Amino acid sequence: GEMEMAGLSICGGNAQLAHTWPNALKLLQTIGAAWKVFKGAGWQQMQPAWASLRLLGRLMRGEEDSEDAVEALIQTASSMPPQSLNVLMLGPCTNLARALQRAPWLASHLKRAVLMGGELTGRRLDLNFMSDRAAARHVISANLPT
């Protein structure tokens, strides 16, 4: 079946928000998509597994963390009936975790939450979960429909 794209939220991940944000805008321009795009969490607000990224996040000046993605998720969900919003996360799930923390009712409006992340080897989390372990724990413990 088809889904309607309500928007695209961007956060830091394997690169800082200062890179992922303009990359997303360029991608949308290149493919000619007219989707709404919202800036979200940067490294300074995330909990990466690597000490070097935590240090870099603290040292970086000018990385602008934004609540726009969180606000967009909450606003979109509030305008839809319960159990009707699908959320697909192709990177760290920080923006959804922050939205769930701010508006716990959001979970009841989700039809499905799909994460690209996990752990398959018994040894180590994948890059998306390692980029913000706290957010991954929060989203998984929210017991969202998948």
Image (spheres, grey):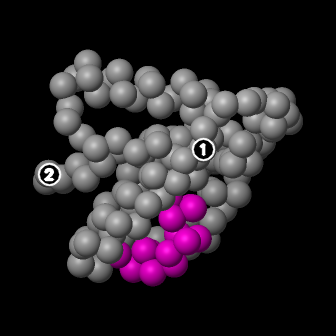
Q: Residues within 10 Å of mark 1 (few under 14, many from 20)?
A: some
- Residue that extends furthest to the top in the rendered view of this protein: 30
Give the image quarter of residue 51.
top right
Q: Is residue 26 above or below residue 39?
A: above
Q: Magenta includes 103?
A: yes
Give the image quarter of residue 127.
top right
* Numbered disc 1: secondary structure: loop
User: Mark 2 vs mark 1: which is more N-terminal?
Assistant: 2
Badge 1 amino acid: Asp
Q: Which residue is mark 2?
A: 2
Q: Position of residue 134 (x, y in %)?
A: 70, 57
Residue 53: give its label.
none
Q: Magenta includes 92?
A: no
Asked if residue 126 shows in the view, the reply is no
Residue appearing at x 43%, y 74% in the figure: 106
Residue appearing at x 74%, y 48% in the figure: 47
Residue 65: give its label.
1
